[in-house]
Amino acid sequence: MATSDKTAIRGIRLPSSLTARIFGILVGLAAWMLLAAVFPNNLMPFPLETLGLAWGLVESGVAWRHLGATLWRTLWGFVGSMILGTAIGVLMGVNNYSRRFFTPYVVIGLSIPAIAWAAVTTLIFGFTLMGPVGATVLTTFPYIAINVWKGVESIENDLVDMSKAFDITRPRMLARLIIPSAAPFLFSGFRFGLAISWKIVTIAEIFAASSGVGYKLMQTYQLYQFETAWAWAILFIIVILIVEYGFVKPLERRVFEYRRDADFALLG
Amino acid sequence: MSTKQSESVSAESIDSQSAASIHLENLGKTFDTKEGTEEVFSGIDLDIEPGTFVCLLGKSGSGKSTMLNIVSNVLEPTEGRVVFRNRDGSEDVNLGHVFQSPRLLPWNTCVQNIEYVHENNPDYEDSHAKRYLDLVGLKNHYNKYPTQLSGGQQQRVGIARALSIDPGVLLMDEPFSNLDEITAEGLREELVRVWQKLDKTVFFVTHDMTEAIQLSDRILMLGKGRIYGDLENPLDRPRELDSNEFLEFRQKAIRLFHSIED
Ligand SMILES: Nc1ncnc2c1ncn2[C@@H]1O[C@H](COP(=O)(O)OP(=O)(O)OP(=O)(O)O)[C@@H](O)[C@H]1O
Ligand SMILES: [Mg+2]
């Protein structure tokens, strides 16, 4: 249904999905301009000025260094939490003993704020890659573990019985039945993990690094360069959009080709 | 419909292992539950000739699925054993399974669903899967996903999958009971047609007398923990559901079916 041209909500005809998206962006820009008009210019610059500043950062090469550092940490934080979260989630799904064993860790992990982990990992690892990466892994893995656990639990017993009746071996069942069956849950864990990894890396960078977008945001803020802080924020958003539309969405489309009508297609 | 499908079949290109016989020897099953032990059946002796189409008929809860699951090797019997024997005397027999619901992998196409069960077949090629899909009348659906098929078509894929491993015995547990009557009727005709082409023993569980009479060579009735009815089906094929012979035999079978009290 994602491609339906007209969706009627209480009699109001909404335009096609593309126009809806453009409309959404325009509303955001209008709100920004309104705020920029109300607040002093050095606190809240207009969109075009901000883009100009951002372009300046790109041209001078500063942007690459810091965006690169943040991307690099996000990548490792994300990979680490996927590995840890998937391993724990699978264990929780396949047997009761490990489910009971891990549940407290996951529940407590869900409630510890990223900033607390960032403080701890900075104390332990200092200004190394492991500071922000450690904080990200520890904050993110419980979310992934829960998703993977649900995914493993959702596997249909009928299909497992069918596989046993046809003498399918365990490795083949894993590859052809268990993993594809858990894929929607794995994917939402993946997507969620990526989304919060960014945030946690930037938070950790505020005091556990001397490079990266989080570090630059803090630095420009302390120097009262609020316009530049906005420019960094914009650059960061652009990178996230590129990752989302250049990588995550196409992957999602490929993985779920068999269920084109699935609900999350609405978010496409 | 059935004539169109018959044309698309290239059964000559399928070489089939010959049918095997089934022997139940003093078979019994008891479940241990919280309320105590529950004996489903015991002391069942039965020999089924190779190539026979057998229907196992019984009321709900009589133990049909339990017996089929033991024959399928999904459940362990409490006593006795099941033996399969090829016509050459060997006991190494392939079993094909068709379930009440199609049980297809939703993320795989028809061809991939068949390929899935050929793990131990080094000679497998997709053309093999396609031949069996042709056989059940799914020529234009090779690369469709199960959600893109009707319920009846999905069940056909399930049948093609079971036949594709060239089983000596085909085990079916109420495979048509989730389908509407018209679709089920079409599939019954197809099944008989396919069975007549390939030499297979079929062990078919149902609670529907008309279905049993239409399909079977032999009807077994399960109730009160034993086989209390064992009828040869005298009707010639193809069978007309409204012919006198059919109705007469059906009357007789139903009388026997109800001869034990609940
Ligand atoms: N796993 C089990 N544990 C305990 N009791 C069971 C189990 N499976 C089946 N039974 C019992 O065995 C009896 C036979 O069940 P079965 O499923 O074989 O019946 P059925 O003839 O296939 O019925 P239906 O026509 O409803 O499918 C029932 O009384 C059921 O409660
Ligand atoms: Mg049953």
Image (tube, coloured by chain):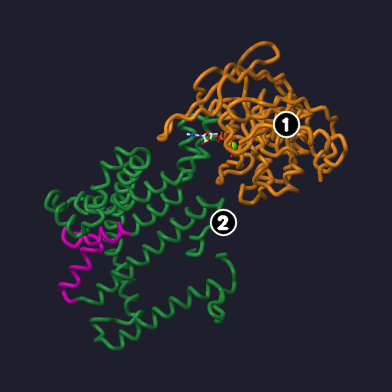
The stretch drawn in magenta includes residue A144: no
Q: Position of residue A237 (x, y in %)?
A: 35, 67
Q: Tell us which disc is closer to us: 2 or 1.
A: 1
The label shown at residue A78 is: none
Q: Are marks 2 and 1 on the same chain?
A: no
Residue at the location (45% across, 61% down)? Answer: A245
Determine the colour of chain B: orange
* Label 1: few (<14), some (14–19) or many (≥20) C-alpha neighbours in 10 Å: some
Residue found at x 61% / y 47%: B146
| B88 or A264, nearer to the observer | B88
Question: Any atom of ligand 1 within 8 Å of the CB at mark 1?
Answer: no
Residue B33 % position (x, y):
43, 33
Looking at the rendering, the quadrant in which ligand 1 lies is top right
B96 and B175: which one is in front?
B175
Label 1: which residue? B256
Residue underneath mark 2: A260
Cα–Cα gap, marks 2 and 1: 52 Å
Q: Quadrant of the C terminus of chain B?
A: top right
Mark 1: which secondary structure? helix
Quick check: A77 left or right of B81?
Answer: left
Above or below — where is A266 with respect to B23? below
**In the rendered image, which quarter is residue B229 located in?**
top right
Q: Which residues are the magenta region?
A: A196-224
- As drawn, B225 above or below A110: above
Outermost residue, right side: B244
